[in-house]
């Protein structure tokens, strides 16, 4: 996966796993002959997403995936609104219960000592993510969803926990074939910069993940205005872009691989 943008104020690299044959990937078709699928995601269950991103998406009829951290104040205090999101056709995605990340990487001072992935056993992460799925199912009634590993970290104390949970999901963000998918995580950049990233992908890229955090507030912010301008761009180019939940996009891909 090609990566741009800044995540938790740190440029990061991902190594994608080749899980799909290149010939099949090249033959992939999206609905209505659209060239590129765009997965908009909003991570960490933030109030600014409910206040600013959701109205902008709904006004334009665009569907997105919201990767929930149930421990967040915005989840705890506004649970009915998250439930409503699912009823509106958005995806409630799994982002674990507690958002454990590696503590030792640069810029990770925010990782609390009780929540460091370095100290967590794989089975503890499996339990946590399984419970997060149950919690989300109790909200949206869905038996299928997708997962975004917090900080895209994979290694727990005794092994790779993402490998241990991936069978529970239709897809895991960051595990796509890098010849097929690209990702940008906007942080204080303009809509023009996001658009530039999208328009400069090689022709083999058929999925672009645009991974937002705060919209007009909270952390890793995109302003409400730039976010709206970007959505308008997607609408203006709807013949080319298929914007949908990550669940729906990856279901369409899966159906063609069978
Ligand atoms: Zn996160």
Image (cartoon, rainbow, N blue to C red):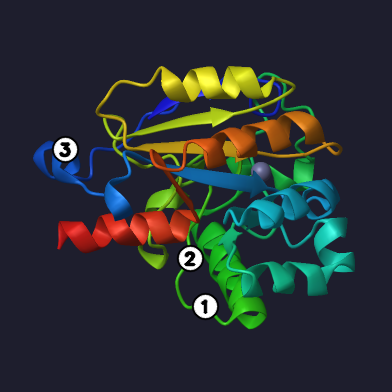
In the shown orientation, is residue 201 left or right of residue 20?
Answer: right
Q: Which residue is mark 1?
A: 142
Closest to the observer, 230 or 148? 230
The picture places residue 79, in percent across and down from the top left corner, at: 81, 71
Q: Which residue has dot 3 on it?
A: 26
Q: On the rendering, which quadrant does ligand 1 occupy? A: top right
Q: Which mark is residue 145?
A: 2
Which residue is depicted at the point 60% across and 50% down?
120
Task: Specify the quadrant that holds the C terminus.
Answer: bottom left
Residue at the image position 48 percent from the left and 65 percent from the top: 145
Q: How far apart are the alpha carbons under marks 2 and 3?
A: 25 Å
- Residue at horizontal 46 percent and vertical 51 percent from the top: 161
In this rendering, the answer to whether 80 lies above or below 226 is below
Pick the front one: 211 or 16: 211
Which is more N-terminal, label 1 or label 3? 3
Say which quarter of the image contains residue 108.
Answer: top right
Residue under the image location 64 percent in, 70 percent down = 88
Inter-mark Cα distance, 3 to 1: 30 Å
Q: Measured from the top left, where is residue 95 in percent x and y?
A: 60, 54
The answer to whether the residues at label 2 and label 1 have Cβ atoms under 8 Å apart is yes
Q: Residues within 10 Å of mark 2 (few under 14, many from 20)?
A: many
Q: As displayed, is residue 247 above or below residue 7?
A: below
Res 230 → quadrant: top right
Is label 2 in a helix, a strand or a loop?
loop
Which numbered disc, 2 or 3, marks the residue closer to the eye? Answer: 3
Looking at the image, residue 24 sits to the left or right of residue 42; the answer is left
């Amino acid at each position: 996966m090609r990566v741009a943008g800044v995540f938790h104020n740190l440029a990061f690299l991902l190594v994608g796993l080749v899980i799909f044959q290149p010939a099949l990937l090249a033959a992939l078709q999206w609905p209505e002959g659209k060239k590129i699928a765009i997965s908009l995601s909003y991570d960490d269950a933030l109030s600014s997403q409910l206040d600013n991103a959701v109205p902008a998406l709904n006004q334009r009829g665009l569907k997105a995936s919201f990767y929930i951290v149930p421990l967040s104040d915005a989840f705890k205090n506004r649970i009915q609104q998250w439930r409503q999101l699912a009823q509106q056709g958005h995806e409630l995605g799994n982002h674990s219960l507690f958002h454990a990340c590696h503590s030792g990487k640069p810029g990770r001072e925010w990782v609390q000592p009780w929540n460091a992935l370095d100290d967590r056993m794989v089975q503890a992460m499996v339990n946590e993510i399984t419970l997060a799925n149950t919690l989300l199912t109790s909200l949206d009634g869905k038996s299928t969803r997708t997962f975004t590993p917090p900080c895209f970290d994979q290694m727990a104390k005794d092994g790779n926990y993402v490998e241990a949970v991936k069978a529970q999901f239709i897809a895991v963000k960051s595990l796509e074939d890098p010849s097929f998918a690209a990702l940008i995580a906007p942080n204080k950049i303009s809509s023009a910069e996001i658009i530039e990233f999208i328009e400069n992908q090689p022709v083999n890229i058929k999925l672009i993940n645009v991974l937002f955090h705060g919209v007009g507030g909270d952390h890793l912010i995109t302003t409400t205005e730039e976010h709206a301008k970007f959505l308008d761009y997607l609408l203006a180019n709807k013949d080319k872009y298929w914007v949908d939940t990550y669940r729906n996009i990856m279901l369409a891909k899966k159906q063609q691989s069978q």
